[in-house]
Amino acid sequence: MLLLIALSAKLEQLLSSHQEEPAVTAGTEERQPLTSIEICAGAGGQAVGLHNAGFRHLALLEIDKFACKTLRTNVRDHPEWAGCEVVEGDVIDVDPFAHQQLAKFALKPGELDLLAGGVPCPPFSVAGRQLGAEDERDLFPRMRQLVNLLRPKAVMIENVKGILEKKFQGYRDEIVAELKGYGYDFCGWELIEACRYGVPQLRPRAILVMIDKKFTVDAKFEWPVGDDSVFTVAEALDQTMSERCQPYGARGQAALEKWRDHAKGRGVAPTLVGGSKKHGGADLGPSRAKAAWAELGIDGMGVANDPDRCDPDRDLFRKNGPMLTVEQAAIIQGFPRHWHFEGGKTARYRQVGNAFPPPVAEAVGRAIAAVLRPEGNQEDLVPAARQEAELSPASADHVGDLQTAVV
């Protein structure tokens, strides 16, 4: 009898923990989502990560028409992205207070929680001429203007690791000095390796974070450190590679086993590159990158067609192994499989190749959120879908088992 009483009490505790949510008082600041605006949003890599960290985007600004289609496809009619505006156009011409899509927010300086963006990397990339401030594509000046206008509580800017080179020290100091003048604490320029955050790719990225001094008086910003565990290309692509090979019977199974044997234990991929609109179609990078992909059993001479348009001899049964599909490239970047890319194959691949890995953005976003809400309940920062997933089918079955035992 005592055992039945104890089991019954445990059952009530489990059920109430999932069914009785604490009451939320309308207008309570702690319960309001953290807001953000992102410039140079691309296909949404940074947006996905920050969304997972608890930020709710008011707007995503992007100039590329295909990337804008991608953003609209994924955020339109999605309840967790409700109210997010995809603003297509040159960020230089977008007035955050007067633009038709942004004016409805009636933002006042200091109200926005986060202004983020991955400004163009060619001015600082070792693959280019590294003209820095002299490059017409440099959008750091516009980002600084927007910070001055909006005075967000936090600023996050991502770029290639080339910006951390000694030759750009003066330029970095200039950016930091200006933002300090607006009342921000300098949290650092940090070089982060995506592979430390569950991304099966190297992809080092330089990230600048600055936070309004009012929030750093009692809370210190701590950079995420990731971990040493490695999510390999073999693990990341196994399911999709199996799906691609399955329709081709024994020939497909043989190709799958050959790829698995080749890729097993090989580690992570080289940095994906998006390429330039001025230079050819999509492939996996220069000769050194192609050689690294070959070590992983992947032919890097091009990008495969989607499975429904597969030319098996071209896309899958190549001498040096299969080509990657756009979806597989997105997995290598850390995108969730449900994130859909718009445009032709080359346009979609470029969106993927130029993206910021969502898991890295999420890690940094959570570190920023911890400063803006040091006493907040961390569950407030978890997307609703993830909260619902906490009571997984397995958990529900466990509750059912307990209920059966009590009966």
Image (cartoon, rainbow, N blue to C red):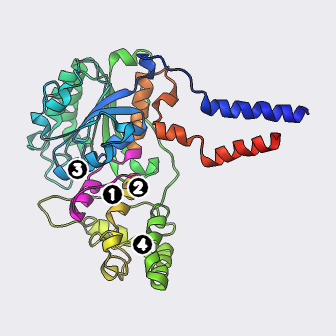
- In-image side of 135 versus 356 (left or right): left
Q: Which residue is mark 4?
A: 244
Query: For mark 4, does the 10 Å Cα neighbourhood hold few (<14), some (14 to 19), or many (20 or more) residues?
Result: many
Residue closest to the far front = 407
Say whether residue 392 is left or right of residue 295: right
Q: Amino acid at mark 1?
A: Thr
N-terminal label among 4 and 3: 3
User: Where's residue 306, x and y in %?
Assistant: 32, 68
**Residue tagged 1:** 271
Asked if the residue at tag 4 contacts the one at tag 1, i.e. Cβ–Cβ closer than 8 Å, the answer is no
Which of marks 1 and 3 precedes in the sequence? Answer: 3
Q: CA distance from mark 1 to mark 4?
A: 23 Å
* Residue assigned mark 3: 69
Question: Of discs 3 and 1, which sits in the foreground?
Answer: 3
Badge 3 marks a residue whose secondary structure is helix
Residue highlighted by disc 2: 337
For disc 3, the neighbor class at 10 Å (few under 14, some 14 to 19, many from 20) is some
* Disc number lying in front (3 or 2): 3
The residue shown at (24%, 66%) is 286
How far apart marks 2 and 1 lie (CA) works out to 20 Å
Determine the image quadrant of residue 320: bottom left
Q: Which residues are magenta?
A: 336-359
Residue placed at 90% from the left, 32% from the top? 2
Which of 111 and 268 lies nearest the eye of the viewer?
Answer: 111
Query: Rounded to the nearest whole Å, what is the CA distance between mark 4 and mark 3?
Result: 26 Å
Q: Is residue 61 magenta?
A: no
* Element on which disc 1 rests: loop
381 vs 295, nearest the viewer: 381
